[in-house]
Image (cartoon, rainbow, N blue to C red):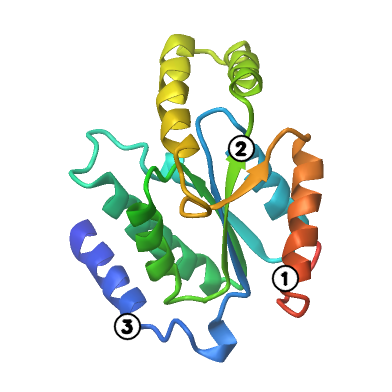
Amino acid sequence: MSRAASWAAIWKSAKQSDDRAPEARTFMIIVINGPLGIGKSTLSEALSERIDRCAMLDGDSLVAVNPLPADPVEHLHRGILLLLRHHRRFGYRHFVINHLWENAAELEDLRCRLARLDDRILCFRMTLDPESNLARIDRRASVRAIDELDYDKETFHREYAVLSGAVGSELGEPWDAAAPPEQLADALLREIRHRYPSGGVQVG
């Protein structure tokens, strides 16, 4: 079987599975949105380390392809669904997904796709004042092998402008990201347990 045919078979099998069967349902899907350098990946890692049977998906890694796909959002969302189904077959029940979603239509598309797996989806938009966010980008650049500081700062300003114009929770519920990652993760978990006291989230 060719590689293309093999992946086609895997995708067909995944689509035909009973995603919402009681024995296979996820318990919680947490989506983290925010601009470059704010700490999405670090927070997601801290959350996944605290939640038992949890898998983390980093959106930037999923779209780090060359050349870029014709529709990066479609490519990302299909990849997320495929990986969630894959992880769930190995017993993982909770998922933390981080990326930048720039408009309500993109995030709603993700919500609709994730609802095939579980309707308990929480989306948070990390917020931080620009000066503090830029300081984090500076610290990150100081330990990176490739100097992309100017590009990162330019990207941040564009993304910040988009996200700061969000109305209400259309791009995720605002969540202050000023605290250290461990404290942010603990606070988010307390909020999740408050909303879903029997949601199945267990500390690992």
- Sequence-wise, the earlier of marks 1 and 3 is 3
Mark 2 crowd level (few <14, some 14–19, many ≥20, 10 Å Cα): many
Q: Position of residue 96 (x, y in %)?
A: 59, 56
Check disc 1 and report the residue beneath it: 195
Q: Position of residue 204 (x, y in %)?
A: 80, 61
Mark 3 crowd level (few <14, some 14–19, many ≥20, 10 Å Cα): few
Asked whether 41 or 134 is in front, the reply is: 134
Q: Residue at x 78, y 34 (%)?
A: 180
- Sequence-wise, the earlier of marks 2 and 3 is 3
**For the residue labelled by badge 1, is the local secondary structure a helix, a strand or a loop?**
helix
Q: Quadrant of residue 67?
A: top left
Q: Is residue 92 visible from the viewing direction of this image?
A: no
Q: Quadrant of residue 162?
A: top left
Check disc 2 and report the residue beneath it: 127
**Amino acid under disc 1:** Arg
**For the residue labelled by badge 3, is the local secondary structure a helix, a strand or a loop?**
helix
Total label count? 3
Pointer 1 with pointer 3, Cβ within 8 A: no
**Amino acid under disc 2:** Thr
Residue 113 shown left or right of residue 176 in the figure? left
Residue 19 shown left or right of residue 9 in the figure? right
